[in-house]
Image (tube, rainbow, N blue to C red):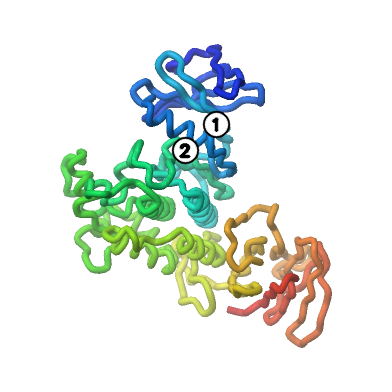
Amino acid sequence: MSGMLDSGTRLAAEHGDEVEILGMLGAGGQGEVYRVRTPGGEMALKWYYPTCATPDQEAIVRELVYRDFDDDRFLWPEAYVPAHRGSFGYLMGLRPDRFKGLPALFRRQLRTSTRALLTACLYTVEAYQALHSRGIAYRDISWGNIFFDPDTGDVLVCDNDNAVVEGDASGISGTMEFMAPELVRGDPGARPGTQSDLHSLAVLLFMLLMNHHPLKGKRELGIHCLDEAAERKLYGKSPLFVFDPQDDSNAPDPMEHATVLATWDAAAGKLQELFRHSFTVGLHEPARRVRESEWRDALRAVLDSVVECASCGRQNMTEPGENPPPRACWGCGAGLVLPPRLTVTTPPPRAEHHIRLRRAARVQAHHLLPEPTRHDCSDVSLVAELVEHPAKPGRFGIANRSKDTWTGTRSDGTPQQIGPGQTVPLRSGLELDLGGGVRAVVRAK
């Protein structure tokens, strides 16, 4: 694969480090990406096509480098590389191989799980929330700019060179399929920012969970040539949600859109409700779009409520909280048998987290906080997990994976201490004092 820069070419970053081109990694709409050697190790270099190497783009890159946004969920521009042969670029970290592109997911080329997809959605929401909280609008949230680990749900946001300070009108407006309707139409005064990012985020979440675009139903099937004019009508002039409760003229076709009909039916009602709001009210009233905090709370609650089907083992979403309505497995149709749930109550501002005690269920550090700013489902933040008795299959207990000693109270009022590494038998009514004012109780349903 040949590109604008030959292997062995040496450049100098603005901060003085020498950059040696090792080889080309890929190309996109704005430029090419190379693997390079620097004094600090191998990195990636994005190099703009001359037509995209505008003064505005240079100013954006310099501003992003200056901001030094240190967040492991983003491959942020780290150093500006000045002009060479009519172009310029910037250095960023290399994307680890475990992170895969969403097109492979949509083509069903990746093995993943319901839990990993929900985790990826939760992490994606929090990543963009972190960006917005610093006054930065991404402006090009789409399937092409985010990568995820299909095993864990970890995410990595790439191509961050289009992010700008909120209110800056320079640069691009986004990818048509993900752009807010007011931007597609070119409404007076409409400009890309955090409000339009919220629409793009909702589209991305829908595609991650449903493997389908929320505005592509029967209407798209009637378009003979999906050119720019047709796309502007579909996404801007007359957008209509495929599951709009008031208008079914753009509903999914049972034959052509079987996947989204199945994934929608399998989704938790809590998420369906937010998607309906996003693509009905949110299409027409930008100020009323679903906020990141709403997505975060719903995704966390649904993630904690995922259970495996006892018949086929597939992971299923169930409704969070107590006494959820009965559901059938999306895979085999068998009725789901819900395991007990652990209700974790935090100190003020009081919050309750309901965790279904499925096999290998986990309590993470974020469950001990009323309003966590960032969720972490990895082993690093593990507090407790459900384990099976090694000599008695089918008997389970809650293992203390924290560094603190808990106080447990059995249903008969008998107290006991559960030290780090110890396990307490799982019984309905068991109460646990996890320290710091956090209490947990096992409930049957």
Q: Secondary structure at mark 2?
A: helix
Q: Amino acid at mark 1?
A: Met
Circle 2 packing at 10 Å, graded few (<14), some (14-19), many (20+), is some
* Residue 404 spot, x, y in % from top left: 80, 65
Picture layout, residue 78 above or below residue 206: above
* Residue 435 spot, x, y in % from top left: 75, 71
Q: Secondary structure at mark 1?
A: strand
**Residue 226: quadrant of the picture:** top left
**Callout 2 touching callout 1 (CB < 8 Å):** yes
Locate residue 381 relative to residue 3 in the image: left or right: right
The residue that label 2 is drawn on is 160
* Residue 332 spot, x, y in % from top left: 46, 63
Picture layout, residue 376 above or below residue 339: above
Residue extending furthest bottom?
Answer: 412
Picture layout, residue 69 above or below residue 278: above
Nearer-N-terminus badge (2/1): 1
Instruction: Name which residue lies at 34% across and 64% down.
Output: 277
Circle 1 packing at 10 Å, graded few (<14), some (14-19), many (20+), is many
Q: Quadrant of the N terminus?
A: top left
Instruction: Name which residue lies at 42% across and 24% down.
Output: 48
- Residue 113 in sight here: no
Q: For this rendering, which residue is in front, 344 or 338?
A: 344
Instruction: Name which residue lies at 38% across and 31% down.
Output: 56
The residue that label 1 is drawn on is 92
Instruction: Name which residue lies at 62% across and 55% down.
Output: 376
